Amino acid sequence: MLELEGAIWFRSGSRDWGGKDRIALLAAIGEHGSITAAARAVGISYKAAWDAIDAMNNSAGEPLVVRAAGGKGGGGTHLTERGQQLIRTYRALEDEHRRFVAHLGRLGEAAADDLHLIRRFMIKTSARNKLFGHVASVHGGAVNDEVTLALPGGQKIVATITHESVETLELKQGAEAFALVKASSVLIGLPDPAARLSARNQLPGVVSRVVPGAVNAEVVLDLDGGGTVAAIITNGSVDELGLAPGVRALAIFKASSVILGVS
């Protein structure tokens, strides 16, 4: 069965109200009537508790917690009606969320694949080309390691990154990862058995579209086996190579132009 976990986080516009931890702090204040006791109950410092309270009060635009006169550890502290209502709302949402997660868990592996795909959609980057795959091999070097990423369609991308990055990203054979390549780093060439290039990555495909600009054009290649790669090249190069939809071509880029990431 699919195992899922989740949490609810309140956000209003660009402001964060907080999530489970802050609601737990509010509830502890309501129970104990003391910042000191509430902080101890949720396992944070007195200062951290007050910092969280100030942030919540500011986000709400009105007090959620009111402190009566008294020194540290003294005086009474209580929740306003707004603070109490926030806890009730959160707990109701949490109950609904728990039922929702349980329902997704009963949908099985098909849902797992879809949720995994949705998570990929949420990765934002400025790089035009984002290709997902699995690590086929990692070859260590003196400074940089060479990582080969196998794409679903059978093609492979080679990247050279530091050994520290390999360890940080926990890249090893079979691990899922994605390759980022800027369109300006991609060259387009025509298939030529006699051509020899130093670039490690030479991915064959078919031109799907050419979008001309004032000086440069965007050329998109449908890779053999699936996936696309976009390149930014000059309009002159487009004309010289005779690039048009349906023309077979190569997407060419250096291993050092590839950035690897994990999600």
Image (spheres, grey):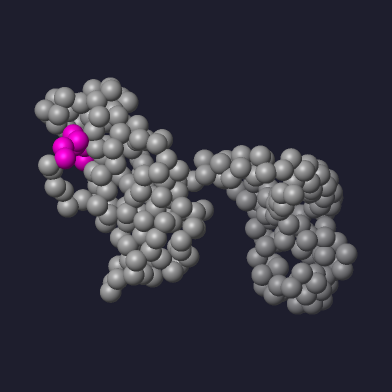
Q: From the viewer's perspective, is 252 left or right of 55?
A: left
Residue at point 46%, 63% (across, down): 172
Q: From the viewer's perspective, is 87 left or right of 5?
A: right
Across and down, in percent, residue 253 comes to 25, 47
> Over which residues does the magenta segment extend?
186-193
- Magenta span includes 189: yes
Q: Quadrant of the rendered structure where residue 114 is?
A: top right
Q: Main secondary structure of the magenta part?
A: loop
Q: Nearer the viewer, residue 191 or 230?
A: 191
Q: From the viewer's perspective, is 202 left or right of 4?
A: left
Relative to 120, residue 161 above or below: below
Relative to 96, residue 38 above or below: below
Residue at point 42%, 40% (across, down): 153
Q: Nearer the viewer, residue 35 or 140?
A: 140
Would residue 195 be seen by someone viewing this image from the given angle? yes
- Magenta span includes 261: no
In this view, the residue farthest toward the top is 245
In this view, the residue farthest toward the right is 31
Q: From the viewer's perspective, is 11 left or right of 254?
A: right
Across and down, in percent, residue 225 comes to 40, 36
Across and down, in percent, residue 3 comes to 72, 52
Relative to 42, residue 87 above or below: above
